[in-house]
Image (cartoon, rainbow, N blue to C red):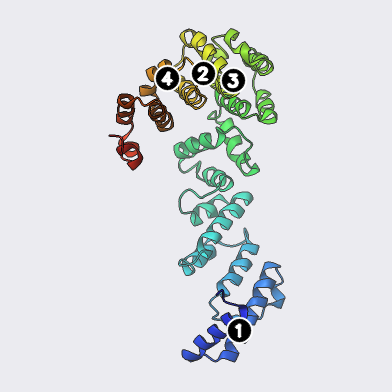
Amino acid sequence: MPATPLRSTLRTLCAAAIIGLPTGSWAATDDAMRDALNAARQQQWQHIDERAIEGHILSGYVTYHRLRNQLPNVAASQVLQFIEQHADSPLSEWMRGQAIAKYGHAGRYGDLLTVADGEPAGTARQCYYYMALIDRAPEESRRAGLALWRVGSSQPDACDPLFNRLRADGTIDATAIWERKMLAWQAGESRLSNYLGGLLSSEWQTALDTVDAVSNNTRAITSAPTCLGPECRATAAFYQAAMQRLTRDDTPTAFAAWQQLSPRLNLTSLERQVIDEELAFYALVRNVPGTLGWVDSVLPSLESERVLELRVRRALADRQWTEVMHWIAEMPSSQQESSRWQYWL
Protein backbone atom coordinates (compact mmCIF):
# COMPACT_ATOMS: atom_id res chain seq x y z
CA MET A 1 0.00 0.00 0.00
CA PRO A 2 1.46 3.42 -0.93
CA ALA A 3 2.55 5.53 2.02
CA THR A 4 0.24 8.46 2.77
CA PRO A 5 1.71 11.83 3.78
CA LEU A 6 0.52 11.21 7.35
CA ARG A 7 2.10 7.76 7.46
CA SER A 8 5.39 9.13 6.06
CA THR A 9 5.42 11.88 8.64
CA LEU A 10 4.72 9.46 11.49
CA ARG A 11 7.44 7.13 10.23
CA THR A 12 9.97 9.96 10.16
CA LEU A 13 8.95 11.18 13.61
CA CYS A 14 9.30 7.67 15.01
CA ALA A 15 12.76 7.37 13.50
CA ALA A 16 13.70 10.71 15.01
CA ALA A 17 12.46 9.57 18.41
CA ILE A 18 14.39 6.29 18.21
CA ILE A 19 17.71 8.04 17.55
CA GLY A 20 17.01 10.63 20.20
CA LEU A 21 16.18 13.70 18.09
CA PRO A 22 13.67 16.15 19.55
CA THR A 23 10.70 15.71 17.20
CA GLY A 24 9.26 19.15 17.77
CA SER A 25 12.59 20.76 16.90
CA TRP A 26 12.92 18.54 13.81
CA ALA A 27 9.51 19.59 12.49
CA ALA A 28 10.21 23.27 13.09
CA THR A 29 13.59 23.05 11.33
CA ASP A 30 12.05 21.21 8.40
CA ASP A 31 9.37 23.87 8.01
CA ALA A 32 12.02 26.57 8.13
CA MET A 33 14.01 24.74 5.47
CA ARG A 34 10.99 24.49 3.20
CA ASP A 35 10.34 28.21 3.58
CA ALA A 36 14.01 28.98 2.97
CA LEU A 37 14.11 26.97 -0.24
CA ASN A 38 11.01 28.70 -1.56
CA ALA A 39 12.50 32.08 -0.72
CA ALA A 40 15.84 31.16 -2.31
CA ARG A 41 14.19 30.13 -5.57
CA GLN A 42 12.49 33.53 -5.67
CA GLN A 43 15.70 35.32 -4.58
CA GLN A 44 13.97 36.68 -1.48
CA TRP A 45 17.03 36.38 0.74
CA GLN A 46 15.61 38.61 3.47
CA HIS A 47 12.94 35.97 4.17
CA ILE A 48 15.46 33.23 4.98
CA ASP A 49 16.05 32.43 8.64
CA GLU A 50 19.70 31.39 8.52
CA ARG A 51 19.85 30.32 12.16
CA ALA A 52 16.80 28.08 11.79
CA ILE A 53 18.29 26.12 8.88
CA GLU A 54 21.89 26.00 10.09
CA GLY A 55 23.15 22.42 9.93
CA HIS A 56 20.10 21.14 8.04
CA ILE A 57 20.94 18.44 5.50
CA LEU A 58 19.41 20.56 2.72
CA SER A 59 20.97 23.88 3.67
CA GLY A 60 23.44 23.54 0.79
CA TYR A 61 20.60 24.06 -1.66
CA VAL A 62 19.98 27.53 -0.27
CA THR A 63 23.69 28.30 -0.58
CA TYR A 64 23.58 26.99 -4.15
CA HIS A 65 20.78 29.36 -5.13
CA ARG A 66 22.51 32.31 -3.48
CA LEU A 67 25.86 31.62 -5.14
CA ARG A 68 24.26 30.97 -8.53
CA ASN A 69 22.44 34.28 -8.29
CA GLN A 70 25.72 36.09 -7.64
CA LEU A 71 27.47 34.65 -10.71
CA PRO A 72 29.50 35.76 -12.61
CA ASN A 73 30.50 38.31 -9.97
CA VAL A 74 31.95 35.65 -7.69
CA ALA A 75 35.57 34.56 -7.41
CA ALA A 76 36.30 31.20 -9.00
CA SER A 77 37.89 30.11 -5.72
CA GLN A 78 34.56 30.54 -3.97
CA VAL A 79 32.84 28.41 -6.60
CA LEU A 80 35.51 25.71 -6.25
CA GLN A 81 35.10 25.75 -2.49
CA PHE A 82 31.38 25.10 -2.90
CA ILE A 83 32.03 22.32 -5.44
CA GLU A 84 34.48 20.59 -3.11
CA GLN A 85 32.23 21.00 -0.09
CA HIS A 86 29.32 19.34 -1.91
CA ALA A 87 31.30 16.82 -3.95
CA ASP A 88 29.05 13.97 -2.78
CA SER A 89 25.83 15.61 -4.02
CA PRO A 90 24.44 16.79 -7.37
CA LEU A 91 24.98 20.37 -6.22
CA SER A 92 28.67 20.29 -7.14
CA GLU A 93 28.18 19.61 -10.85
CA TRP A 94 25.12 21.84 -11.02
CA MET A 95 27.24 24.68 -9.71
CA ARG A 96 30.12 23.88 -12.06
CA GLY A 97 27.78 23.99 -15.05
CA GLN A 98 26.19 27.25 -13.92
CA ALA A 99 29.59 28.84 -13.37
CA ILE A 100 30.84 27.79 -16.82
CA ALA A 101 27.75 29.28 -18.46
CA LYS A 102 27.83 32.54 -16.50
CA TYR A 103 31.60 33.05 -16.71
CA GLY A 104 31.51 32.24 -20.42
CA HIS A 105 28.70 34.68 -21.13
CA ALA A 106 30.61 37.39 -19.26
CA GLY A 107 33.87 36.62 -21.08
CA ARG A 108 35.62 35.67 -17.84
CA TYR A 109 37.48 32.83 -19.50
CA GLY A 110 40.20 32.47 -16.89
CA ASP A 111 37.61 31.87 -14.18
CA LEU A 112 35.79 29.46 -16.48
CA LEU A 113 38.88 27.31 -16.95
CA THR A 114 39.55 27.40 -13.21
CA VAL A 115 36.21 25.78 -12.40
CA ALA A 116 35.95 23.53 -15.47
CA ASP A 117 36.83 19.86 -15.20
CA GLY A 118 37.36 19.00 -18.86
CA GLU A 119 34.79 19.42 -21.62
CA PRO A 120 31.39 20.25 -20.11
CA ALA A 121 28.05 18.86 -21.23
CA GLY A 122 25.83 20.90 -23.52
CA THR A 123 26.62 22.77 -26.72
CA ALA A 124 26.53 26.29 -25.25
CA ARG A 125 28.91 25.42 -22.42
CA GLN A 126 31.21 23.58 -24.82
CA CYS A 127 31.40 26.66 -27.02
CA TYR A 128 32.28 28.81 -24.01
CA TYR A 129 34.84 26.24 -22.85
CA TYR A 130 36.69 26.02 -26.16
CA MET A 131 36.61 29.78 -26.59
CA ALA A 132 38.28 30.01 -23.18
CA LEU A 133 40.80 27.36 -24.20
CA ILE A 134 41.74 28.77 -27.59
CA ASP A 135 44.89 30.59 -26.47
CA ARG A 136 46.08 27.82 -24.15
CA ALA A 137 45.37 24.84 -26.42
CA PRO A 138 44.71 26.26 -29.89
CA GLU A 139 44.77 22.97 -31.82
CA GLU A 140 42.35 21.24 -29.47
CA SER A 141 40.10 24.27 -29.44
CA ARG A 142 40.05 24.61 -33.23
CA ARG A 143 39.37 20.92 -33.73
CA ALA A 144 36.48 20.98 -31.27
CA GLY A 145 35.21 24.27 -32.68
CA LEU A 146 35.02 22.82 -36.18
CA ALA A 147 33.05 19.85 -34.85
CA LEU A 148 30.60 22.25 -33.19
CA TRP A 149 30.37 24.22 -36.44
CA ARG A 150 29.72 21.23 -38.70
CA VAL A 151 26.06 20.66 -37.88
CA GLY A 152 23.02 21.20 -40.04
CA SER A 153 21.08 23.26 -37.53
CA SER A 154 21.49 26.57 -35.74
CA GLN A 155 23.77 26.60 -32.73
CA PRO A 156 23.24 28.67 -29.55
CA ASP A 157 24.32 32.32 -29.49
CA ALA A 158 26.95 31.21 -26.99
CA CYS A 159 28.88 29.75 -29.94
CA ASP A 160 29.15 33.06 -31.81
CA PRO A 161 32.39 34.26 -30.13
CA LEU A 162 34.10 30.94 -30.86
CA PHE A 163 32.87 30.78 -34.45
CA ASN A 164 33.84 34.40 -35.08
CA ARG A 165 37.32 33.73 -33.75
CA LEU A 166 37.69 30.63 -35.93
CA ARG A 167 36.47 32.49 -39.00
CA ALA A 168 38.92 35.31 -38.29
CA ASP A 169 41.91 32.96 -38.07
CA GLY A 170 40.86 30.94 -41.13
CA THR A 171 39.96 27.73 -39.32
CA ILE A 172 36.40 28.12 -40.55
CA ASP A 173 37.11 28.87 -44.19
CA ALA A 174 34.86 28.99 -47.26
CA THR A 175 34.95 25.20 -47.58
CA ALA A 176 33.78 24.78 -43.98
CA ILE A 177 30.98 27.28 -44.63
CA TRP A 178 29.93 25.35 -47.74
CA GLU A 179 30.01 22.02 -45.90
CA ARG A 180 27.75 23.38 -43.19
CA LYS A 181 25.45 24.86 -45.80
CA MET A 182 25.12 21.39 -47.34
CA LEU A 183 24.34 19.85 -43.95
CA ALA A 184 21.64 22.48 -43.42
CA TRP A 185 20.25 21.92 -46.93
CA GLN A 186 20.23 18.19 -46.35
CA ALA A 187 18.36 18.70 -43.06
CA GLY A 188 15.79 21.02 -44.62
CA GLU A 189 17.06 24.03 -42.65
CA SER A 190 16.54 26.47 -45.51
CA ARG A 191 16.98 29.63 -43.45
CA LEU A 192 20.39 28.55 -42.17
CA SER A 193 21.37 27.24 -45.60
CA ASN A 194 20.52 30.57 -47.24
CA TYR A 195 22.39 32.52 -44.57
CA LEU A 196 25.52 30.44 -45.05
CA GLY A 197 25.28 30.80 -48.81
CA GLY A 198 25.36 34.55 -48.35
CA LEU A 199 28.77 34.26 -46.69
CA LEU A 200 30.35 32.80 -49.83
CA SER A 201 32.05 34.75 -52.60
CA SER A 202 31.15 34.73 -56.30
CA GLU A 203 33.65 31.89 -56.80
CA TRP A 204 30.99 29.60 -55.37
CA GLN A 205 28.13 30.87 -57.56
CA THR A 206 27.96 27.84 -59.87
CA ALA A 207 27.74 25.59 -56.83
CA LEU A 208 25.01 27.77 -55.31
CA ASP A 209 23.06 27.75 -58.58
CA THR A 210 23.36 23.96 -58.76
CA VAL A 211 21.87 23.60 -55.29
CA ASP A 212 18.93 25.77 -56.33
CA ALA A 213 18.39 23.71 -59.48
CA VAL A 214 18.45 20.38 -57.63
CA SER A 215 16.24 21.79 -54.87
CA ASN A 216 13.58 22.48 -57.50
CA ASN A 217 14.08 19.15 -59.28
CA THR A 218 15.94 16.39 -57.44
CA ARG A 219 16.40 14.41 -60.65
CA ALA A 220 18.51 17.25 -62.03
CA ILE A 221 21.36 15.79 -60.01
CA THR A 222 22.37 13.59 -62.96
CA SER A 223 23.11 16.67 -65.08
CA ALA A 224 24.89 18.63 -62.35
CA PRO A 225 28.55 19.59 -62.94
CA THR A 226 31.12 17.10 -61.73
CA CYS A 227 33.33 19.90 -60.40
CA LEU A 228 31.77 22.51 -58.14
CA GLY A 229 33.34 25.42 -56.32
CA PRO A 230 36.94 26.63 -56.43
CA GLU A 231 39.22 23.67 -57.16
CA CYS A 232 36.14 21.39 -56.91
CA ARG A 233 35.97 21.96 -53.15
CA ALA A 234 32.16 21.99 -53.18
CA THR A 235 31.75 18.71 -55.05
CA ALA A 236 31.87 16.05 -52.34
CA ALA A 237 29.61 17.80 -49.83
CA PHE A 238 27.09 18.67 -52.55
CA TYR A 239 26.76 15.13 -53.89
CA GLN A 240 26.61 13.63 -50.40
CA ALA A 241 23.78 15.97 -49.41
CA ALA A 242 21.94 15.75 -52.72
CA MET A 243 22.14 11.96 -52.85
CA GLN A 244 20.90 11.63 -49.29
CA ARG A 245 17.92 13.85 -50.05
CA LEU A 246 17.10 11.83 -53.16
CA THR A 247 17.75 8.48 -51.47
CA ARG A 248 15.28 9.20 -48.70
CA ASP A 249 12.73 10.69 -51.09
CA ASP A 250 12.90 8.14 -53.92
CA THR A 251 15.36 5.28 -53.42
CA PRO A 252 14.91 3.58 -56.84
CA THR A 253 15.55 6.88 -58.63
CA ALA A 254 18.52 7.57 -56.36
CA PHE A 255 19.98 4.16 -57.16
CA ALA A 256 19.63 4.73 -60.90
CA ALA A 257 21.13 8.20 -60.60
CA TRP A 258 24.10 6.92 -58.61
CA GLN A 259 24.88 4.30 -61.25
CA GLN A 260 25.24 7.17 -63.73
CA LEU A 261 27.07 9.56 -61.46
CA SER A 262 29.49 7.35 -59.57
CA PRO A 263 31.89 6.61 -62.47
CA ARG A 264 32.05 10.31 -63.39
CA LEU A 265 32.82 11.76 -59.98
CA ASN A 266 36.31 12.18 -58.60
CA LEU A 267 35.57 11.34 -54.96
CA THR A 268 37.72 9.69 -52.33
CA SER A 269 36.74 6.27 -51.01
CA LEU A 270 35.57 7.83 -47.74
CA GLU A 271 33.46 10.40 -49.59
CA ARG A 272 31.86 7.64 -51.66
CA GLN A 273 31.30 5.54 -48.56
CA VAL A 274 28.92 8.14 -47.12
CA ILE A 275 26.71 7.91 -50.22
CA ASP A 276 27.01 4.13 -50.63
CA GLU A 277 26.12 3.44 -46.99
CA GLU A 278 22.95 5.52 -47.02
CA LEU A 279 21.84 4.12 -50.38
CA ALA A 280 22.54 0.51 -49.36
CA PHE A 281 20.60 0.98 -46.13
CA TYR A 282 17.48 2.32 -47.83
CA ALA A 283 17.73 -0.18 -50.69
CA LEU A 284 17.48 -2.98 -48.12
CA VAL A 285 14.86 -1.27 -45.94
CA ARG A 286 12.63 -0.66 -48.95
CA ASN A 287 13.55 -3.89 -50.72
CA VAL A 288 14.31 -2.05 -53.96
CA PRO A 289 14.37 -4.52 -56.88
CA GLY A 290 17.66 -4.99 -58.69
CA THR A 291 19.84 -3.51 -55.96
CA LEU A 292 20.93 -6.55 -53.94
CA GLY A 293 23.93 -7.39 -56.12
CA TRP A 294 25.20 -3.83 -55.83
CA VAL A 295 24.63 -3.83 -52.05
CA ASP A 296 26.68 -7.02 -51.75
CA SER A 297 29.49 -5.50 -53.81
CA VAL A 298 29.87 -2.39 -51.65
CA LEU A 299 28.92 -3.78 -48.25
CA PRO A 300 32.38 -5.10 -47.24
CA SER A 301 33.83 -1.59 -47.57
CA LEU A 302 31.06 0.26 -45.71
CA GLU A 303 31.93 -0.68 -42.11
CA SER A 304 28.24 -0.28 -41.32
CA GLU A 305 26.66 -2.39 -38.60
CA ARG A 306 23.16 -1.29 -39.50
CA VAL A 307 23.54 -2.36 -43.15
CA LEU A 308 25.12 -5.68 -42.18
CA GLU A 309 22.22 -6.37 -39.84
CA LEU A 310 19.71 -5.64 -42.59
CA ARG A 311 21.61 -7.86 -45.02
CA VAL A 312 21.56 -10.79 -42.59
CA ARG A 313 17.86 -10.28 -41.96
CA ARG A 314 17.26 -10.26 -45.71
CA ALA A 315 19.12 -13.57 -46.06
CA LEU A 316 17.12 -15.04 -43.16
CA ALA A 317 13.87 -13.97 -44.79
CA ASP A 318 14.97 -15.62 -48.05
CA ARG A 319 16.19 -18.73 -46.14
CA GLN A 320 19.63 -18.38 -47.69
CA TRP A 321 21.60 -20.01 -44.87
CA THR A 322 24.99 -19.77 -46.54
CA GLU A 323 24.47 -16.04 -47.01
CA VAL A 324 23.37 -15.72 -43.39
CA MET A 325 26.62 -17.22 -42.14
CA HIS A 326 28.69 -15.24 -44.64
CA TRP A 327 27.34 -11.84 -43.62
CA ILE A 328 27.44 -12.62 -39.91
CA ALA A 329 31.11 -13.47 -40.39
CA GLU A 330 31.59 -10.00 -41.93
CA MET A 331 30.30 -8.30 -38.79
CA PRO A 332 32.75 -6.75 -36.32
CA SER A 333 33.30 -9.02 -33.32
CA SER A 334 31.34 -6.75 -30.97
CA GLN A 335 28.26 -7.13 -33.19
CA GLN A 336 28.86 -10.74 -34.15
CA GLU A 337 29.01 -11.88 -30.52
CA SER A 338 25.38 -10.97 -29.92
CA SER A 339 23.28 -14.03 -29.09
CA ARG A 340 20.85 -13.14 -31.87
CA TRP A 341 23.60 -13.81 -34.45
CA GLN A 342 25.48 -16.57 -32.64
CA TYR A 343 22.31 -18.65 -32.81
CA TRP A 344 22.71 -18.98 -36.59
CA LEU A 345 26.37 -20.01 -36.60
Q: Position of residue 54 (x, y in %)?
A: 57, 81
Circle 2 or circle 3, nearest the eye:
3
Q: Nearer the viewer, residue 163 or 307?
A: 307
**Mark 2 or 4 closer to N-term?**
2
Q: Does the CB distance between marks 2 and 3 fall below 8 Å?
A: no
Q: Position of residue 98 (x, y in %)?
A: 58, 57
287 relative to 299 in the view: left or right: right
Marks 3 and 4, how far apart in space?
A: 17 Å
Amino acid tagged 4: Val
> Which residue position holds label 3?
250
Q: Is residue 247 above or below residue 338?
A: above
Classed neighbour count for the residue bearing mark 4: other residues with Cα under 10 Å, few (<14), some (14–19), many (≥20): many
**Mark 3 or 4 closer to N-term?**
3
What residue is shown at x 42% (from left), y 27% (from top)?
314
Circle 1 or circle 4, nearest the eye:
4
Q: Is residue 92 above or below residue 5?
A: above
Classed neighbour count for the residue bearing mark 2: other residues with Cα under 10 Å, few (<14), some (14–19), many (≥20): many
> Which residue position holds label 4?
295
Classed neighbour count for the residue bearing mark 1: other residues with Cα under 10 Å, few (<14), some (14–19), many (≥20): some
